[in-house]
Amino acid sequence: MEAQSDDYSLPPKDKAELLRRIRREWDALEQAIAGLPEAQMGVPDAGGWSIKDNLAHLTAWERFMRLAYIHKMPAHEAMQVDAETYRGVDETGMNAILFQRNRDRPLAEVLAGLREEHARVLDELAKLSFEQMQTPLDPADPQKRPLLNWIVGNTYDHYREHRLTIQKITAK
């Protein structure tokens, strides 16, 4: 049986390992929010983000990865902003837009959206071969970084990052 290591310093060696990592971190995220009272999910931390805001953020970036990187939709359309806005902001600015867009959404809607988008991503990943994931996301990229980097960054790495944030919030 394979060890359940959380050491993700190396990329997954194959699609099965990628999916195991995604499942492991998704399950850990779900466990981190399981049973939390709705009121607690909406309380902002010192940075102003609540657990609900973290979950809406994850949904938006998973959706973006699926639409822009897998389906090749123009990035601004995948992020649901106009092209000028997209060109004019960095990741921090985009996160601020996402925060404002989602902050007043009901928790039930955010949770349903998170789970629906996660299922869509899993469906899309099932259709891709590991070889396809190894191809450069952008053929003009001098570093030839593979699609896999963005899949990792918008799935299990991202789930883990926000799960740890959520655990800090709930530990207080």
Image (cartoon, helix red, strand yellow):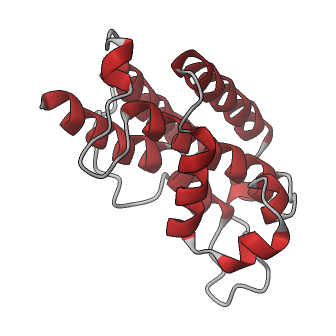
Q: Is residue 107 left or right of residue 6?
A: right
Q: Residue at x 56, y 32 (%)?
A: 104
- 64, above or below 116, in the image: below
On screen, residue 63 versus residue 32, left or right, reads: right
* Residue situated in front as seen by the camera: 97 or 170: 97
**Residue under the image location 80 percent in, 75 percent down:** 84
Can residue 31 be seen at all in this image of the molecule? no
- Which residue is drawn at the image coordinates 87% and 57% (left, top)? 73
* Vertical placement of residue 110 versus 146, above or below: above
In the depicted view, which residue is nearer to us: 9 or 56? Answer: 56
Q: Quadrant of the N terminus?
A: top left
State the residue lying farthest toward the bottom. Answer: 142
List the single residue furthest toward the left.
172
Q: Position of residue 142 (x, y in %)?
A: 67, 90
Which x, y percent locates residue 146? 65, 68
Is residue 55 placed above or below 10 in the rendered structure? above
- Comparing 137 with 33, the one in front is 33
Give the tally of numbered discs.
Answer: 0
Picture residue at 79% right of the left edge, 64% below the top? 75
Closer-to-camera residue (72/89): 89
Question: Image quadrant of residue 159?
Answer: top left
Say left or right for 125 vs 159: right
Q: Quadrant of residue 81?
A: bottom right
State the quadrant of the C terminus: top left
Residue 160: x percent and y percent?
Answer: 36, 43
In the rendered image, the vertical position of residue 30 relative to residue 138, given as above or below: above
Q: Can residue 166 be seen here?
A: yes
Q: Position of residue 70 (x, y in %)?
A: 79, 53
